[in-house]
Amino acid sequence: MKYYKELPNGYKEVYSIDAGNTKTGLILNLIGLPIMIVMFIILMVIKSLVCGKINFDLSDGETSLVLFILCIVMILYIIIHELTHGLFYNFFTKEKLKFGLKLTCAYCGVPTIYMKKIPMIITALAPFVIYSLIGVILMIVVPYNVIFLAIDILFSAHVAGCVGDIYISFLLIKYPKETLVNDTGAKQTFYILDRKEDELCESLN
């Protein structure tokens, strides 16, 4: 059993984060922006040290086409990112998924369940791990040209876009193993077992 359909007795809410909230979403996005810029610069520098001068052997029209395709791919990536969360949620729970889009974030959640800590961490980090590996491989094999530049932008945006998932996962690590999470999509709420109530129940039994 990786989840509960109802919150078990003895649990209490201890933390919640709502990326759909304008202030919270803005903070997460502002954190992600410098991460994206720094990541982009680091990857460009590393590739330049290995390959030398970047090759922009494209016409203005071809470069514009590449950048247009990049914009489309970035939109598709957001969809694929959330579908990946959904794939893992479905694997662990088989429950109905909730997808959505707000001004500050896109999201996927399962609002009707309370998920255990480990499967929640796996689900949260799945897109980051999978697409980071794919991105690294692509940046190694692709020549140092405008295509690499586009992949670098996409990869850096991917890492920045995973800030919320990484933050939630690192928060969960410090909580007890029996911690449960209710994910309504944009908002995640943590619940832990109230030790006093748990000990009282054990003494009565």
Image (cartoon, rainbow, N blue to C red):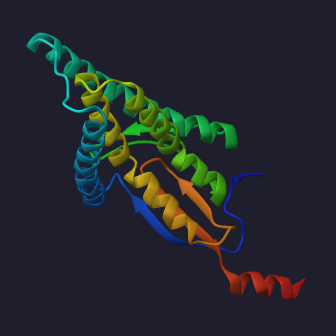
Residue 161 x %, y %? 35, 45
Q: What residue do we see at 65% from left, 51% from top?
A: 119
- Side of 15 where 192 appears, left or right: right
How many marks are shown on the rendered structure?
A: 0
Q: Name the foreground residue: 130 vs 85.
A: 130
Residue 67 x %, y %? 20, 22
The reply to whether residue 116 is visible in this rendering is no
Residue 18 x %, y %? 39, 58
Indicate whether 101 appears above or below 31: above
Q: What residue do we see at 34% from left, 51% from top?
A: 20
Residue 94 x %, y %? 68, 37
- Side of 42 where 138 appears, left or right: right
Indicate whether 169 appears above or below 124: below
The reply to whether residue 29 is visible in this rendering is yes
Q: Name the foreground residue: 93 vs 142.
A: 142
Q: Name the foreground residue: 50 vs 22.
A: 50
- Side of 165 where 21 appears, left or right: left
Q: What residue do we see at 11% from left, 11% from top?
A: 59
